[in-house]
Image (tube, rainbow, N blue to C red):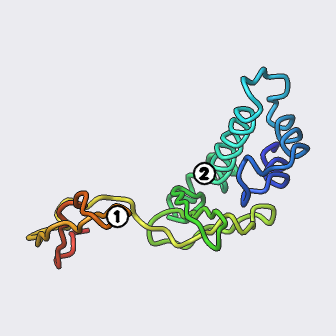
Amino acid sequence: MHSEGAIELYDLEKSYTEQPEDVMDEVEQIFKMKGVQWPTPNYRRMMIAQKMDRSLRKVLTSYGHVFFSLYMLLELANVPCRYRIFSFYGENKKPRCEICGKPEQEPPPLPEWLQIPYLVPVKGYSMEIIPDSCVNPTTRNGDRLYNQAERTVGTLGAVMTSLSTGKS
């Protein structure tokens, strides 16, 4: 798969503006983007970075799909076989991508070439919004916002909290 070579070359802990030119040239070649007439060099770098991100997500969401009938067996057995949720954050001034599969299931193992610090596999969690999770909320006024001269310029707005937990 061409994504593997590109992911091994590209340093996902660096911004697209910090990637060495020779790496950008090779990744551009791998993704068959060579010869595209880019409006600016920065736009070229940005488009290659976006292609890298989409390619990495595609690899992670399809990881474990050996062939369709095996996938169906894994789904029936309720075995996690791919990553579904991607959350981005920073740690020690380095970007990280937290990845997880199905809610409450341990993350599937990554192949050796994807075991990089940028990817952080975690136990699955649900992104479902539970509408009744704020039953009988208490409301408090928003906190004041200040400018540099320490003058009030507005508020964050009301904040709702609730001691009740939502139904699953």
Task: From this view, report whether residue 147 is shown above or below residue 34.
Answer: below
The answer to which quarter of the image holds residue 92 is: bottom right
Residue 3 image point, x, y percent: 78, 46
Which label number is shown at residue 61?
A: 2
Residue 114 location (% of width, % of height): 75, 61
Residue in view at x 85 percent, y 38 percent: 30
Comparing 68 with 117, the one in front is 117
Which secondary structure lies at badge 1?
loop
User: Quarter of the image containing the C terminus?
Assistant: bottom left
Q: Quadrant of the N terminus?
A: top right
Pointer 2 local density, CA inside 10 Å: few below 14, some 14–19, many at least 20? some
Residue found at the far top of this picture? 37
Of all residues shown, which one is farthest toward the front? 149
**Element class at badge 2:** helix
Number of marks? 2
| 131 left or right, relative to 8 | left
Q: Observer-nearest residue: 59 or 50?
A: 50
The residue positioned farthest toward the left in the image shown: 136
Which of pointers 2 and 1 lies earlier in the amino acid sequence? 2
Mark 2, mark 1: which one is toward the viewer?
Answer: 1
Distance CA(mark 2)–CA(mark 1) = 49 Å
The residue wearing badge 1 is 149
Query: Which residue is depicted at the point 27% across and 63% down?
Result: 151
Please say if the residues under marks 2 and 1 sit with CB atoms less than 8 Å apart. Answer: no
Report whether 32 appears left or right of 129: right
Callout 1, which amino acid? Ala
**Which residue is pictured at 24% across the width and 66% down the height?**
144
Whole-percent x, y for residue 20 in the image: 86, 49
Q: Which mark is residue 110?
A: none
135 to 53, vertically: above or below? below
